[in-house]
């Protein structure tokens, strides 16, 4: 099914000569208003703009040239936004990376990007220290540390020292980029191999705001925003930078791990109005004894992405806090959400309908477009925010970017009312007795049981080497785990699902393997089948 064919018009609305950082600052009409609040300081739009402009001046003064890459490995502080926007303003390419990776991961990304500068938080610098000292990365000319850099090392300085060195006299125009100039890369999680860098342009950031955030979420300068997803994640980049800064809203940043207790304190203390999270966090928050009462909060809009939202979590959240969770589908390749529920039109158990400006189609196993309702296919999307390519990876680029269409890797069905229902990742689907079974559907049934906090369902072989569903379950009270409860959960699923879908085995776990962005890594659970 094709949605609103507005992609070309949306792109044409952005002038050919375009720099996102310049455009963004043009909308900051209240310089003394709070742009960012972190645990230590409130930063006004004036202070943020000054930090962005100074970093933009420092880059060329330090010998860095247009289109060179700047690897950004920063915790969520104002320096993240200043480094990212300053890099774009100067016409270089920002490469923000996950802050939870290993030394080997960073070595790969430094080599792959050939970055000439590294901007890194003091707490994260030890993961880079040996790499820098090895001399393997001769292209890396400058290291900027947010915090205190090591003493006596050449080409190292603090972020504050870098911007203090920048001249503040005279004019400093943005680099003369176009809307199609490469602005930044985002590495995918690399769950099935080496990470792939999705390459995005200057226009993509503005378009995610104009097509999704502005019409769907209706953000204004009066909103206070908080995102559980970190800024290095495509979802978090929109939530905590692009969207609020586009309208002059205030964003609360949390450099540390977002526990339910810490987030509850932020929601209450700062009276957050727009809250972005992922399904596993919404579930943990609801189960937390520190979860605040409805009257303590001021939420008007809650958004979930990263993984499909189990319907029971959405319904319980609405009952508890009087506001719906808008579940949506986005991707690193498309930059943000392109399929979404919306205020006043929420159907739990679905990802909603296409965001205007994006087209959606489902492709069957035979390679043909599915036109009938309730038939499963792989979801493909067409829209103006699609990545240009994967950097230095022609094979994967050709497989994912099919002309105007981008493969999502997700299996969906479209119901008769036009809502899209998530069935699972292409690699996560089970075929039981020749019939497709969605792991997400079985997980949703398990999570509707009052004792279950989280669940993951994967394909498992029985004694006859036939595929059946197996469930890994995290309980709200681990002490409740027993054979009797496992049987009760199986019966619970049989009441909610077709008989062939219930999990034949249930294994209780203390936690489930997840990515840094909260997605359950079912492939790691499947791998255990080969080890047993």
Image: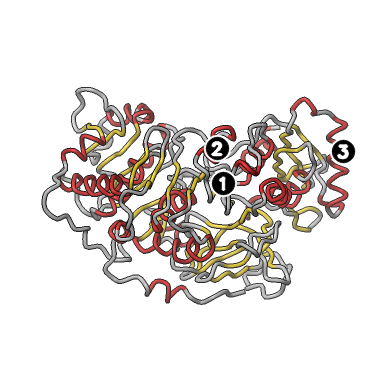
Of residues 416 and 169, the one drawn nearer to the viewer in this rendering: 169
**Quarter of the image containing the N terminus?**
bottom right
Circle nearer the viewer, 1 or 3: 1
* Mark nearer the N terminus (1 vs 3): 1
The residue under the point 30% across, 57% down is: 25
Query: Which residue position is annotated with label 2?
Result: 263
Name the disc covering residue 277, or none: 1
Of the image marks 3 and 2, the number of the one nearer the N terminus: 2
Can see residue 337? yes
Q: Residues within 10 Å of mark 3 (few under 14, many from 20)?
A: few
Where is residue 380 shown, x and y percent of the image? 56, 65
- Say which mark, if any, is on residue 215: none
Image quadrant of residue 482? Answer: top right
Task: Name the N-terminal-most of marks 2 and 1.
Answer: 2
Tell me if label 3 and label 2 are in contact, CB under 8 Å. Answer: no
Drawn side of residue 351 relative to residue 214, left or right: right
Q: Is residue 304 left or right of residue 528?
A: left
| CA distance for labels 2 and 1 | 10 Å
Are the residues flagged by discs 2 and 1 in contact, CB closer than 8 Å?
Answer: yes
**Chosen colour scheme:** secondary structure
Query: Residue 517's spot in the image, x, y percent?
Result: 53, 43
Secondary structure category for the residue under label 2:
helix
Question: Could you tell me how far apart the alpha carbons at marks 3 and 2 are, in whole angstroms?
Answer: 33 Å
In the image shown, does 133 or 235 lie closer to the viewer? 235
Write down the residue under mark 3.
Answer: 488
């Amino acid at each position: 099914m094709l949605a609103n064919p507005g992609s070309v018009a949306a792109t044409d609305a952005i002038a050919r000569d375009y720099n996102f950082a310049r455009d963004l600052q043009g909308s900051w009409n209240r310089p003394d208003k709070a742009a960012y609040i972190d645990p230590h300081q409130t930063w006004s739009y004036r202070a943020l703009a000054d930090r962005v402009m100074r970093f933009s001046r420092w880059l060329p003064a330090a010998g860095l040239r247009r289109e060179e890459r700047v690897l950004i490995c920063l915790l969520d502080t104002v320096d993240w936004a200043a480094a990212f926007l300053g890099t774009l303003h100067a016409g270089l390419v920002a490469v923000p990376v996950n802050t939870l990776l290993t030394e080997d991961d960073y070595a790969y990304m430094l080599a792959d990007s050939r970055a000439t500068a590294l901007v890194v938080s003091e707490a994260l610098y030890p993961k880079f220290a040996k790499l820098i000292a090895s001399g393997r990365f001769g292209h890396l000319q400058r290291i900027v540390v947010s915090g205190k850099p090591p003493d006596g090392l050449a080409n190292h300085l603090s972020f504050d020292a870098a911007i203090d060195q920048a001249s503040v006299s005279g004019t400093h125009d943005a680099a003369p980029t176009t809307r199609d100039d490469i602005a930044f890369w985002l590495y995918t999680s690399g769950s099935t191999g080496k990470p792939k860098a999705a390459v995005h342009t200057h226009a993509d950031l503005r378009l995610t705001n104009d097509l999704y955030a502005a019409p769907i979420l209706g953000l204004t300068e009066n909103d206070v925003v908080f995102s559980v997803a970190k800024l290095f994640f495509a979802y978090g980049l929109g939530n905590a930078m692009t969207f609020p800064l586009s309208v002059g809203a205030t964003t609360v940043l949390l450099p540390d791990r977002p526990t339910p207790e810490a987030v509850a304190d932020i929601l209450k203390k700062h009276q957050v109005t727009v809250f972005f999270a992922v399904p596993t966090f919404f579930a943990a928050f609801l189960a937390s004894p520190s979860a605040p009462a409805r009257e303590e909060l001021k939420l008007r809009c809650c958004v979930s992405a990263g993984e499909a939202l189990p319907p029971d979590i959405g319904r319980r959240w609405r009952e508890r806090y009087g506001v719906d969770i808008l579940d949506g589908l986005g991707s690193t390749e498309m930059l943000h959400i392109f399929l979404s529920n919306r205020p006043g039109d929420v159907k739990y158990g679905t990802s909603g309908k296409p965001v205007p400006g994006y087209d959606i189609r489902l492709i069957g196993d035979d390679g043909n477009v599915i036109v009938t309702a309730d038939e499963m296919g792989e979801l493909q999307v067409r829209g103006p925010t699609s990545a240009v390519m994967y950097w230095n990876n022609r094979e994967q680029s050709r497989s994912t970017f099919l002309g105007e269409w981008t493969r999502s890797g997700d299996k969906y069905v479209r119901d008769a009312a036009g809502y899209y229902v998530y069935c699972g990742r292409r690699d996560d689907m089970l075929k039981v007795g020749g019939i497709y079974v969605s792991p997400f559907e079985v997980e949703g049934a398990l999570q509707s049981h009052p004792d279950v906090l989280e669940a993951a369902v994967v394909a498992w072989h029985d004694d006859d080497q036939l595929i059946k569903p197996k469930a890994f379950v995290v309980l709200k009270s681990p002490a409740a785990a027993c054979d009797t409860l496992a049987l009760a959960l199986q019966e619970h699923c049989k009441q909610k699902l077709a008989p062939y879908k219930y999990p034949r085995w249930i294994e209780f776990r203390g936690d489930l393997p997840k990515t840094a962005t909260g997605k359950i890594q079912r492939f790691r659970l499947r791998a255990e089948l080969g080890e047993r």
